[in-house]
Amino acid sequence: MLLELARSKSILFFGGKGGVGKTTVSAATAMAMAAEGKRVLLVSTDPAHNLGHLFNRTVGPRPVRLASNLDGMELDPEQTVNEHLEEVSASLRKLMAPHLAGEVDKHIELSRDAPGMQEAAIMERIAEVVEKAATDYDLLVFDTAPSGHTARLIALPEMMSAWTDGLIQRRDKAERFSSVLRNMGSDKSVGNKILGGQEDPLVERESRIRSLLNRRRRRFMDLRNALNNPERTSFVIVLAAERLPVLETIALHDQLRRSGVTVGALVVNKRSPEGMGEFLAERRIQEEVHLGTLTEALPDIPRQDLTLVAHDVVGLEALERFAVSLGAGITA
């Protein structure tokens, strides 16, 4: 079921409560698709990155080859914020008068620790990855942070598109006001004019601002459209058959639905195996109680159960074996 979903999409997000095995399931799905010949990019947006540990190699903010047809990258929040602010600072310095450079630096430093800055920077990086990777890869697989962080992240494109639209509208009003002043003025007027065939610096500055804002708006609108397109994108919630992960899954589903994101599958990881003694039998009965709550709340979403394995899933060989198990997992 999970692999069938992966075959039909170009973007898959994996999310859920911390510690349920999102990285392992997303990586195994990516490997299974790569083994079928798809060009796959596996991207971690979780600040507590595990891709490097899982593949036993260094993975950074730029794509590296993990296996045949499979590349991976980790979006580091702090580095992403630094790169984001450096880009913003460079743009502002071009747009502002030279004597305001100190104010630009002050604003940037105050913004560095502003609430939501890391989420905004990560989301802009995700938008960039989706935009640029479309021609190089058949499938993008995102291993996301725990539920609450991911829900806020998914809602950001809508909010940031609206915020950018507001900025553009305010720039429109400022441009119209400046145009009136220019048309009313003479060489000695307050309004800025085009003199000696030279373009007014204010007009040029406004044009640059508009170009930056339009580029940002287009990027966020493209990401929002991709997230809200069920033919292209789906979200997979990974959980354990326990009370808190089940309740968090139901809440995450509601948040994603409000953001227009389709949940295509539920993956119950680390199910207690059957026929393994009284303790695990009782544990499995308890799991069925919690999964009954899940089925009652989300009856229309396909579910796949993956049995707990005896050893840690680390390294290519273990991941390949786990990827094979995805095709044999019990589907509910």
Image: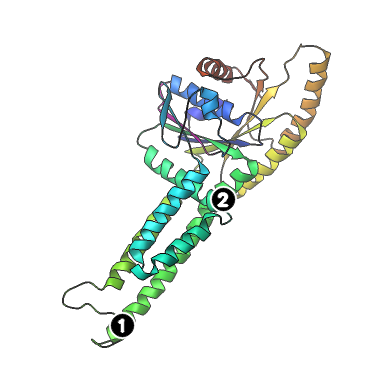
Label 2 vs label 1, nearer the camera: 1
The residues bearing labels 2 and 1 have C-alpha atoms spaced at a distance of 42 Å
Mark 2 residue type: Ala
Residue 92 position within the rendered picture, expressed as x and y whole percent measured from the top left: 38, 62
Identify the residue at horizontal 66%, vertical 26% (top origin): 269
Is 37 inside the magenta-drawn segment? yes
Write down the region rendered in magenta: 36-45
Tag shown at residue 30? none
Whether the residues at callouts 2 and 1 have beta carbons within 8 Å, the answer is: no
Can residue 173 be seen from the camera position used here?
A: yes
Q: Quadrant of the C terminus?
A: top right
Q: Position of residue 133 (x, y in %)?
A: 39, 37
**Height in image: 12 above or below 192?**
above
SS type, badge 2 = helix
Mark 1 secondary-structure assignment:
loop
Q: Amino acid at mark 1?
A: Gly
Q: Position of residue 206 (x, y in %)?
A: 33, 68
Task: Name the side, left or right, on which 37 lies relative to 48.
Answer: left
Percent x, y of residue 246: 72, 35
Does residue 28 appear anywhere in the picture?
no
* Along the line of sight, the residue nearer the viewer: 39 or 328: 39
**Residue situated in front as seen by the camera: 317 or 256:** 317
Q: Quadrant of residue 176?
A: bottom left
Image quadrant assignment for residue 137:
top left
Pick the front one: 319 or 33 = 319
Numbered label attached to residue 191: 1
Q: Which mark is residue 155?
A: 2
Quarter the N terminus occupies? top right
**Neighbour tally class for label 1: few under 14, some 14-19, many 20 plus, Cα within 10 Å:** some
Q: Is residue 287 magenta?
A: no
Say which residue appears at 43% left-offset and 48% top-offset.
Answer: 83
User: Residue at (28%, 68%) from the top-left corner?
Assistant: 204
